[in-house]
Image: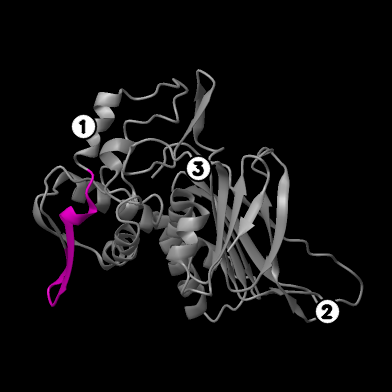
C-alpha cells in the first residue's frame, strides 16, 4: 500500500437538485483516509449512518490484511515469513488468485512479486532519485510469480514459496477486491444504490435515484491527465460497474528532463514507456478492473486487445501523451 495520501484519479460527480413537490432522496455519506488514499462513500435509500460506520470498519479490517508497510498486517507477515508454506486468509487467497492469473496471461510483464524492485523507487519523499541499475538488476532476480503456489485445502488457505526472497505487492489489486466486498456488504443489507470511491477506484451499485422516482446512471468523471489538479477529461454514465484509472501523473517525478512514474514493467524494473498517460477500465468486477488498469497500461492497446478479445464485458480507454484516445 502507498504511504502518501493520493487524490483520486477518478472524480465522482453526483448532483442532487431540490424542488417543491419532489420526493426526498434519503442518503448517508462519509469520507475517511484508508489504504493511504481518500475513501468516499454514499449510500442511497437510507438515513442509517451506522452503515457508513460499518463500511469504514471493514476498510480498517482490510488494511490489516493487504498493507505491505503495516507490520501488523497479514501481507507484511507473509512477506516476512516467505519460506515454505504459509497459512493465509481467504481474502488474501482470493485476491492473489485473480492477480496471479494475469501474471500468467502477461507472461510476467505484470507480476505481483515485483516488490523487491518497486521498493527501490521512492515517489514520496521528493528526492527524485533513480535507483542504480545494479540495484534494479539485483531486485529483478527476486521477481518471479512462479515462485508462489496457492493451495486451498480442508484446513484452510495456503501460499507455498519456492524462493524465500519472494515479496508480494497487491497495490494493483487490493482496492478493487475491497470495493467488491463493500458492495457485497451493502447488497446483504438490502441496499440497491450506492457509490464507493477508493482513490482511483470508483464502484457503483445499481443506479442513482432521482426526485422524480426514476433511476439514472451515476456520472463518473475521468480526471484530465493533462490537468490533474482539477480538469475533467470525460464524464461516463455507469450502472453496476467499477471504473478504475491508472495514470502516470499521481506518483511520479522528473529527473534530467525525463518523467519517471510508478507503473513498472516487471521485466525491466523501469517505468513503462508506451506513450500512455492513463488507462481506464470499466467492468462489473472491481478486482478485475483494478488489475486490468495496470495490466492494460503495461501491455498497451495491441496487447490488451489480444488479452481481452474474448471478454466483451470489459471496456478500456487509453489516453496517450499526444492527447489521442483509443478504446476497446
Tag 2 and tag 3, C-beta contact below 8 Å: no
- Front label number (2 vs 3): 3
Quarter where residue 320 is shown = top right
Q: Determine the secondary structure under disc 3.
A: loop
Q: Which residue is mark 3?
A: 274
Q: Is residue 200 left or right of residue 310?
A: right
Rendered residue at 34%/50% (across/down): 109
Packing grade of label 2 (10 A; few <14, some 14-19, many >=20) is few
Q: Is residue 292 left or right of residue 243?
A: left
CA distance for labels 3 and 1:
24 Å
Residue, far top:
256
Residue 300 lies in the magenta stretch: no
x 38%, y 45%: residue: 1
* Residue beneath the point at 62% across and 40% down: 321
Mark 2 vs mark 1, foreground winner is: 1
| First reached walking from the N terminus: tag 2 or tag 3 | 2
| Residue 150 within the segment the image draws in magenta | yes
Q: Is residue 104 left or right of residue 278?
A: left
For marks 3 and 1, give the one nearer the viewer. Answer: 3
Residue 315 position, x and y percent, is: 57, 66
The quarter of the picture where the C terminus appears is bottom right
Cα distance in 3D space between marks 2 and 3: 46 Å
Q: Secondary structure at mark 1?
A: helix
> In the depicted view, which residue is nearer to us: 10 or 17?
10
Q: Which residue is mark 1?
A: 138
Kindly tell me whether residue 163 is visible in this rendering: yes
Q: Which residues are magenta?
A: 143-158
Q: Name the disc covering residue 212, or none.
A: 2
Q: Secondary structure at mark 2?
A: loop
Residue 42 x/y as whole percent = 62, 63
Badge 3: how crowded within 10 Å, few (<14), some, or many (20+)? Answer: few
Amino acid at each position: 500500500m502507498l504511504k502518501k495520501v493520493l487524490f483520486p484519479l477518478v472524480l465522482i460527480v453526483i448532483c442532487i437538485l431540490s424542488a417543491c413537490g419532489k420526493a426526498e432522496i434519503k442518503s448517508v455519506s462519509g469520507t475517511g483516509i484508508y489504504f493511504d488514499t481518500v475513501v468516499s462513500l454514499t449510500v442511497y435509500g437510507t438515513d442509517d449512518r451506522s452503515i457508513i460506520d460499518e463500511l469504514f470498519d471493514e476498510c480498517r479490517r482490510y488494511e490489516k490484511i493487504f498493507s505491505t508497510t503495516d507490520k501488523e498486517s497479514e501481507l507484511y507477515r507473509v512477506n516476512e515469513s516467505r519460506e515454505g508454506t504459509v497459512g493465509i486468509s481467504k481474502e488474501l487467497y482470493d485476491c492473489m488468485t485473480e492477480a496471479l492469473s494475469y501474471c500468467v496471461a502477461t507472461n510476467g510483464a505484470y507480476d505481483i512479486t515485483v516488490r523487491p524492485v518497486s521498493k527501490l523507487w521512492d515517489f514520496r519523499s521528493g528526492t527524485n532519485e533513480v535507483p542504480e541499475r545494479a540495484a534494479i538488476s539485483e531486485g529483478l532476480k527476486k521477481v518471479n510469480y512462479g515462485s508462489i503456489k496457492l493451495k486451498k485445502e480442508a484446513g484452510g488457505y495456503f501460499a507455498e514459496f519456492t524462493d524465500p526472497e519472494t515479496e508480494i505487492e497487491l497495490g494493483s489489486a487490493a482496492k478493487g477486491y475491497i470495493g467488491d466486498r463493500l458492495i457485497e456488504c451493502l447488497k446483504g443489507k438490502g441496499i440497491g444504490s450506492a457509490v464507493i470511491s477508493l482513490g482511483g477506484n470508483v464502484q457503483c451499485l445499481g443506479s442513482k435515484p432521482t426526485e422524480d422516482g426514476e433511476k439514472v446512471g451515476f456520472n463518473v468523471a475521468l480526471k484530465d491527465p493533462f490537468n490533474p489538479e482539477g480538469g475533467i477529461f470525460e464524464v461516463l454514465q455507469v450502472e453496476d460497474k467499477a471504473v478504475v484509472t491508472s495514470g502516470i501523473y499521481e506518483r511520479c517525478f522528473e529527473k534530467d528532463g525525463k518523467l519517471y512514474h510508478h507503473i513498472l514493467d516487471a521485466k525491466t524494473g523501469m517505468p513503462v514507456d508506451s506513450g500512455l498517460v492513463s488507462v481506464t477500465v470499466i467492468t462489473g468486477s472491481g478486482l478485475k478492473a483494478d488489475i486490468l488498469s495496470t495490466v492494460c497500461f503495461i501491455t498497451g492497446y495491441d496487447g490488451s486487445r489480444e488479452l481481452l478479445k474474448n471478454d466483451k464485458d470489459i471496456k478500456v480507454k487509453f489516453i496517450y501523451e499526444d492527447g489521442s484516445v483509443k478504446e476497446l
